[in-house]
Amino acid sequence: MQFTINGKPTSVDADPRTSLLDLLRDHLHLFGAKKGCNQGACGACTVLVDGGQRILSCLALAAQYDGREITTIEGLADEHGLHPLQDAFIEHDGFQCGYCTPGQICSAIGMIAELERGVPSHVTNDIASKHIPLSSDELRERMSGNLCRCGAYNGIVGAITDTYAEAVK
Amino acid sequence: MTPFTYARAHDVAEAIKLAGTSAAKYLGGGTNLVDLMRETIERPTSLIDVTGLSSAIEEQADGSWLIGAAATNTAVAEHPVIRQCFPVLTRAIVAGASAQIRNMATVGGNLLQRTRCVYFYDDDGSRCNKRQPGQGCDAINGFNRMHAILGASDQCVATHPSDMCVALSALGAEVHLESTAGKRVVPLTDFHRPPGDQPQIETLLQPGELITSVGLPPLPFGKQSTYRKVRDRASYAFALVSVAAAVDVAGERIKDLRLALGGVATKPWRAWKLEQTLRGRRASVANFQSAIDAELADAKPLSDNAFKIDLTRRAVVAVLSELTGVSA
């Protein structure tokens, strides 16, 4: 199988049973994406596919993503430093134990792309409208697939709001 | 997981040919199937990935809309025409799962989702007629708060988990199928089977038959439609009760309507009796109540889920009131 992982072409041999999460962690030693529930309930394994679509790597068979681009938390920082959302999580205490954090951050980046594209959510009143502001209700609903057992939600919401308040008005 | 081979299909003919044996399964987003394989409840010997087949959402010459089975939940929910002409479908989709799962899950896979009955999942310690035909059902006398009050049998009381299918049922969707025997189109309301004495057979799909697309016939009053879901959490939970409805109001009368229920039945439950009772009648809370009472006349509550009867009544009256402008 051939992937582009965090910008690098990567070739891996793996059994068809291998999930994308196990491929990242066990075969490529990228331990950022976490195995929380391994059944699609917690969001700790969230990664970005093909430039920003958020998916759960635990429910994805690696073989299905052969040929695609995968971005994990390890791929967000660049030579200038951390991704602005990573800085904001530190600034806002958006975590305690940190286990859900890579999934939260990847998920939030995917969420903003969906919002900018005008994807409606369960709490969107006018679903015909493509302009959806990032209200607190929208943010919480759209991030509901990422659980934080430490309960750092206020910090997480603060970090995301701060980072994207200007972008999504 | 038990071992399997994996292959990608590039067109429908190739998918059907690759599937061949009955131990093969078509793979969509994998959000349900991969989980069931990990639990060894599903044990296919080969997976045919059909996510590369048609995901187009296109208007047909007769004014209907055809959704390729590989379209993701997100793609359907965000499509401008679906949002405008069939808002019930967008609302149902975004009421289900999480954004990450909606980005992966496909329309074809959604139709084939299996129940989240805890006894179905518990293959180490529970009996389940769906998992092991003839074994018995531990839900009927067990913890059955989430289970069905409509359409159940003495073999199975598991609910169908989909939100999307409830909207598709209300909209009179058609399921397009293809196999080596040819093509056929079946109404979504017939696609899922009630459990009866064979709860392990959940749809009318034949071995190797593939869902290629789902059709939405024209429904001018589809614009006046919505979906309401009642669940234990505000987000990311399966329905206790859900209502998909579209209503055509002329003056004070209900000229026509479509209504389907989720979370309460063994399949997406089209409320035919309610529709028949209300069609042509005046829009009023009293009429909504007698119509849902007609629909629920056959409801059979279990030890823990009688609350669903009242919850369904209230949810249906609230939705019909909202759509007709009657104050509840």
Image (cartoon, grey):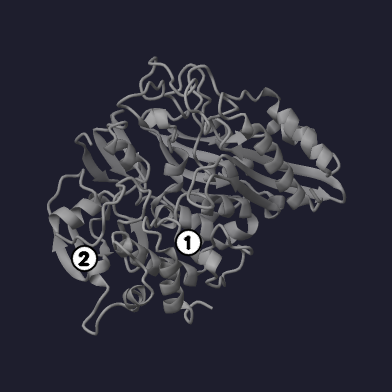
Residue at 41 percent across and 51 percent down: it is B54
Which of the 4 image quarters holds residue B21?
top left
Where is B96 relative to A114, above or below? above
Point out residue B27 in the picture as x, y percentages from the top left corner. Answer: 33, 43
Residue at 70 percent across and 37 percent down: it is B313
Point out residue B37 in the picture as x, y percentages from the top left corner. Answer: 29, 37
Q: What element carries label 1?
A: helix
Give the chain letter at badge 2: A
Question: For the residues marked 2 and 1, what is the alpha-carbon distance in whole angstroms?
Answer: 27 Å
Disc number for residue B282: none
Quadrant containing the N terminus of chain B is top left
Where is B221 relative to B46, above or below? below
Frontmost residue, A11 versus A162: A162
Give the chain letter at badge 1: A
Does residue B250 appear left or right of residue B230 in this picture?
right
Point out residue B137 in the picture as x, y percentages from the top left corner. Answer: 44, 20
Residue at 56 percent across and 57 percent down: it is A122
Q: Which of marks 2 and 1 is nearer the N terminus?
A: 2
Amino acid at dot 2: Thr
Frontmost residue, B161 versus B190: B161
Q: Name the residue under label 2.
A: A4
User: Mark 1: few, some, or many residues within 10 Å (few <14, many ≥20)?
Assistant: many
Contact flag, marks 2 and 1 (Cβ < 8 Å): no
Residue at 59 percent across and 28 percent down: it is B149
Frontmost residue, A49 versus B177: A49
**Furthest residue to the top?**
B134
User: Mark 2: few, some, or many residues within 10 Å (few <14, many ≥20)?
Assistant: some
Q: What element carries label 2?
A: strand
Where is A161 relative to B188, above or below? below
Q: Mark 1 points at which residue?
A: A142
Q: Which of marks 2 and 1 is in front?
A: 1
Point out residue B168 in the picture as x, y percentages from the top left corner. Answer: 57, 43
